[in-house]
Each structure stands twice: as structure tokens, then as C-alpha cells.
Image (cartoon, rainbow, N blue to C red):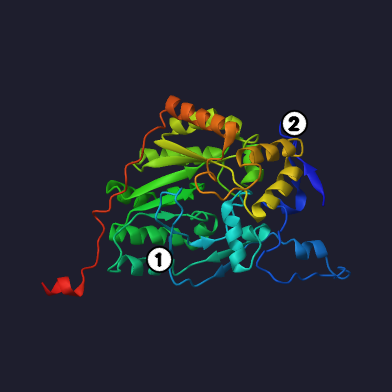
Amino acid sequence: MAYNVVNDLDNNIVIPKNVRGRGALLNTHNKFDKHVVEDFWDGSYYDEEFLTNSNETSFTEIFPKTILNKVDSPDILASWSMNPYQGCEHGCIYCYARVTHEYWGYSAGTEFEKNILIKKDAPALLAKKLKSKAWKGEPIMLSGNTDCYQPAEKKFGITRQLLEVCLKHNQPVGIITKNALVCRDLDILKKLAQKNLVQVHISLTTLDESVRRVMEPRTSSAKNRLKTIETLSTNGIPVHVMLAPIIPGLNSDEVFDICEAVGKAGASSLNHTMVRLNGAIALLFEDWILKTFPLKATRVLNLIAEVQGGKLGNSTFGERMKGTGMLAESIHQQVRLAKKKFGLVYKPKPLSQVLYKSVPTTQLNLF
């Protein structure tokens, strides 16, 4: 594989030419595949590299029976989530959602970024659920898995339709995104915010664009995310920041700078998590950092293992997002100090459930 060295002496970033604009630099084996097909074609008549390394994104419509997912994790506050898209073109190399793409027959690597599954009937499914007699208007989190404002949203507009359904039923909804496209829906978000029915959480991992471009290649720039925070805040929409994940040795030195920047932009609060690399994500991240940050790679990998009990991944509830040990505690203390210094300790009030428009039962209608 050919490499192109970017002129960045501080980070010594190396970018593989043939996957520019993608996060993962390889495809990992899908653990659910029983058979592996090997292709022994020698490419004598065609350009093999062109055919096997197409960087185009494909979109496939799928037809789920429901759009809501029950969240049972004790370290995630949301009870329900919904994801209009599976797979994510943002390409964040550390993304925990990568392994879920294996359930659909794709890899957690480049196929997660290039094969996006679209749920066009999601708004109809949500409307049906909200009309159910059993539904009580519990808050729903948009983007519990993949980003609802990823590039596909500009083309398909499913997230906007979901928000329109929520507004119609006064359904409380939270949003997690790292894309400035959320500002397109200011008109709906302002109406929801007036009734305390929405909160937006902007994910921000680094202010360093040379790092952001290779770690989260198709996300909005840090500058645009800060502008998004400011725009949402000035329009009366509660906006919070997720400093997630913190990767020791890569972005852990930016804690105070990030907190200062988002505080000035108008964020109300900030939460953080430590990086965790489970399953195929560990292999993808290790390959990526060895190729992209060769001088930092060994140190970063060792520091991640230090905060995750000696491994790159940790699935233990209560530990997986916080990490363990002295290094993890040191980072937590930095975050606590930075939040206090820059006014980010506000605890968001719960979204309103009292306005939710439930559907009367037949028995009640008799009276």
C-alpha cells in the first residue's frame, strides 16, 4: 500500500492514498461469516485496484418492524433509542457501532462506512408506535447507535421527518450528533424546545483539524461544531457536549481547551467517556493508528490498555465508559476541574412527558 506523508511534524500523520476520506483502512472479517471467499483473479484485463477499492457509498433500503430500540444498559440514561440509518459515512475509527454492522452481513471496517442501510419507513413506524395505547411518552434518543445527521440525511431527510412526528405528538426527544446539519432543522427544534421536548448533544473529540480529518474524516469540522453549539444556544435550544471518547495520548491533552471552547460557544453542560475498543474495533483502531500516527501508536495503545484493565476493550458495565486505574482517575479530575472553571456543571432538567398526546382507549371513549 502506498502512503502519503502529510506535512505535520508535530503529529507525523501518514494517510494511505487509496482510502482518503475514510476512517478504517481495512476490512475486518465478519465473525458471523462461516465461510471466507478468496479471490485469486490476477487482474490481467482490468484495473484490479480500481475495482476492488471503489470509494463510493451505496445506500440500501431495509424494512424493520419497529424503529424503537429498548436500551437496557445501566450506564446509559436513555430508555429508548431510534436510528434511521445503519452504518455511518462519518467514518470515526473508534466508533462502537461498527460491530453492529456485522449483524447485517457487512464488515466493521470500510463496509460500515460505505454500505449505509436506510429506513425510509421510520417516520411511519414511529407514528404508529406513538399512537399505541401502551406508549407513555418516554423520552427517545435519536442516534443511540449511528449519527442521525450523517451525510445520508442530506439526501433522504428521514431524521427531519422523525422530528416532525415528535412535534405532532409532543414526544420528548434527545439528539446526539457531530454534524452541523442539525441546524437545518432549527424551525422544528425551536418549537420542540419551547415545550421542553428536545435536547441536542454535540459530540466533540478534538479541536485539532489535522487529527479530526483522519480520525473522523467525514464529520463537521471542530469550527463548525462550535458554530453549531452557538447557533442552537442562541435559538433557545438546550445544547450539551459529549467529549467522547477521550483517547489517552491522542486527545487527552485537549480537555481544558475543549471545555473552554464549548463554554464560550454557549454549551450548558459537558459529559465525557473513555475510549473502549471491543471486538473488531480493536483491530481496526490498532491498524489505523500504526499507519496514521506511527510515532505515537505504541504509547497510545498502551495507555488505552492501562485505563481498560490491561485490554483495548472492556464490556463491564460501570467500567467500560469510565475506565479504571490512576490514569483514568487523573483524566476524570481534569474534566471535573475544567467543567467547573468554564461553567459546564449544569445538570440538564428532564424532558417533559406531560404534553405527550396519548390516544384514548375505546373504553374511555364510551364515557
**Residue type indicated by callout 1:** Pro
Q: Residues within 10 Å of mark 2 (few under 14, many from 20)?
A: few
321 and 2: which one is in front?
321
Q: Quadrant of residue 43?
A: bottom right
**Residue 55 lies in quadrant:** bottom right
Does residue 191 appear left or right of residue 1 in this picture? left
Which sits earlier in the primary sequence, circle 2 or circle 1?
2
Label placed on residue 123: 1
Give the vertical position of 296 relative to 24 (above or below): above
The residue under label 2 is 9
Q: Residue at x 43, y 50 (%)?
A: 175
**How packed is label 1: few (under 14 Cα within 10 Å), some, or many (20 or more)?**
many
Q: Secondary structure at mark 1?
A: helix
Percent x, y for residue 68? 42, 63
At 47% from the left and 34% from the top, the residue drawn is: 262
The C terminus lies in quadrant: bottom left
Q: Position of residue 307 (x, y in %)?
A: 61, 38
Q: CA distance from mark 2 to mark 1?
A: 48 Å
Percent from the top left, x then y, of residue 119?
49, 67
Q: Is residue 363 visible?
A: yes
Residue 307 or residue 107, whichever sits in front? 307
Total numbered labels placed on residues in the image: 2
Q: Residue at x 48, y 62 (%)?
A: 84
Give the x, y percent position of residue 5. Answer: 78, 40
Q: Amino acid at mark 2?
A: Leu
* Residue 207 visible, this orientation: no
> In this image, 283 relative to 308: left or right?
right
Q: Secondary structure at mark 2?
A: loop
Left or right? Give the position of 298 relative to 203: right
